[in-house]
Image (spheres, rainbow, N blue to C red):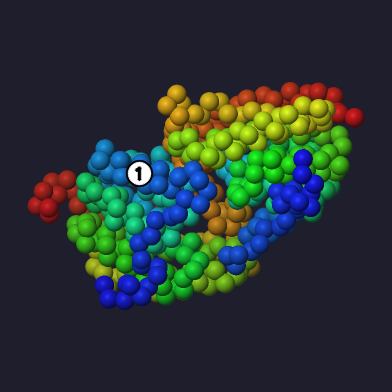
Amino acid sequence: MSAEASNPAATPTPCEDTQGDGRWMSQHVRFVSETKDREPDVIFVGDSLVQLMHQFGIWRQLFSPLHCLNFGIGGDATQHVLWRISNGELDNISPKVVVLWVGTNNHGHTAAQIAGGIMAIVQVIHNKLPHAHTLVLGLLPRGRMPNPLRERNAEVNKLVQDALSSLSHASFFNVDPGFVLSDGSISHQEMYDYLHLTAHGYQAVCEPLHAQIKSLLEKPAEN
Amino acid sequence: MSGDELNPAAVPQQVEDLHGDGRWMSQHVRFVQECKDGEPEVLFVGDSMVQLMQQYEIWGEMFSPLHALNFGLAGDTTCNVLWRLQNGELENIRPKVVVLWVGTNNHQHTAEQVAEGIVAIAQLLTNRLPKAKIVVLGLLPRGERPNPLREKNAAVNRLLSSRLPRLGQVLFLDVSKEFVHSDGTISSQDMFDYLHLTLAGYRTLAKPLSDLLLQILEETPEERRASLV
């Protein structure tokens, strides 16, 4: 893995307010204040695929009962999530499980850099929450037909899965139920814009994820 | 219309495939195909504010029953919507109403340019669909607290409220004030990221919009359609 200084995907970086309404920072500040009020057993952290999960009925149905917090921000790449968790979003809480889903927005970075960014996040989580288990979700394929980003995401998944295999406090979880059909296409019934999941797409992802989280919660705490 | 060449917000423009997965074009191609397959009475067109509406149950509850198509595309500016409408997304369909909601992503343009871009789209729609009513939705406030983009969007809305009525078949619906609390904040219960609406946020918008659509649709009953064409 590349050293932090030479890997932009593994260098904590806040999101610049280029548009002028400060929304990214507002969301981060809100998440930090949620750590003060709540005692979650599970934290979800990542990009829009995490954030949007919270907007569908499936969240209330499957995850609210498990005492979960959702710290997803649309557009985030690994370096943004790294900054957020290093600046308050994991303070004051002791969840048993952290679900991490990020990497698809790391445009301009290589698969190796993205994997390095994900592993840097896993390390920070472990430093701050030594008793938590981190579940790293595989990046989903994207785009209607085969394209370079699908290859990049698959390569990231391979590298991350390898790197995680030697760790006891973190594991890789593949949430792709088979979105890519035999002709190589992804249906808009699963991903309405060939990236973001529909309610139907989330159902297919969340049911196995929920089962995995439940089994982690039922295990005795990690040392 | 004179001045369009000078207004960058009224210049039709595709979205460049910067990421490499061609998603914008894939969605446009799908919408063009939907024009061949469907006979919508209502067409929704715009940016993510339109697109996301279809992902919540509110779409199935309130808008699918009206035979609506959704041609929302996240990130779109007035330029992108103009391009899409000129390149197939109005072919073969004769909706009675078009709902247009776009402008919040026009970051390179002034409020005046954005408003004129929206007017240009409304004019294109009335030219292509002379029997249709066009409902333009006001840009919602954004950001947790007062900020320059709220002022800009409000300025666009002011310009639209005075210019759109001159176009005859065009109505303007602005529900902005429903979202800002007395302390100037917008709640994440209404906009989960202080821009995009939650289900609760969409319900606030959907009620007046749905009422307006039903009213318009009742004004042009099936029996009268033949005589209008």
Residue B7: x, y in percent? 37, 73
Residue A178: x, y in percent? 53, 25
| Residue density around tag 1, few if under 14, some if 14–19, many if 20 or more, within 10 Å | some
Residue B155: x, y in percent? 46, 74
Residue at figure coordinates x 26%, y 46% from the top left: B41
**Pointer 1 chain:** B
Q: Amino acid at mark 1?
A: Val
Query: Is A125 above or below relative to A27?
Result: above
Residue at figure coordinates x 56%, y 35% from the top left: A151
Residue at figure coordinates x 76%, y 31% from the top left: A164
Q: Nearer the viewer, residue A154 or B142?
A: A154
| Residue B189 visible, this angle | no
- When asked about the image quadrant of residue A149, the answer is top right
Please give left or right for residue B30 compared with residue A139 in the image. Answer: left
Residue A210: x, y in percent? 66, 28
Please give left or right for residue B84 compared with residue A130 in the image. Answer: left
| Residue A136 visible, this angle | yes
Q: Residue furthest right?
A: A223
- From the image, tell me which residue sits under label 1: B29
Please give left or right for residue B53 compared with residue B87 in the image. Answer: right
Rendered-image quadrant of the N terminus of chain B: bottom left
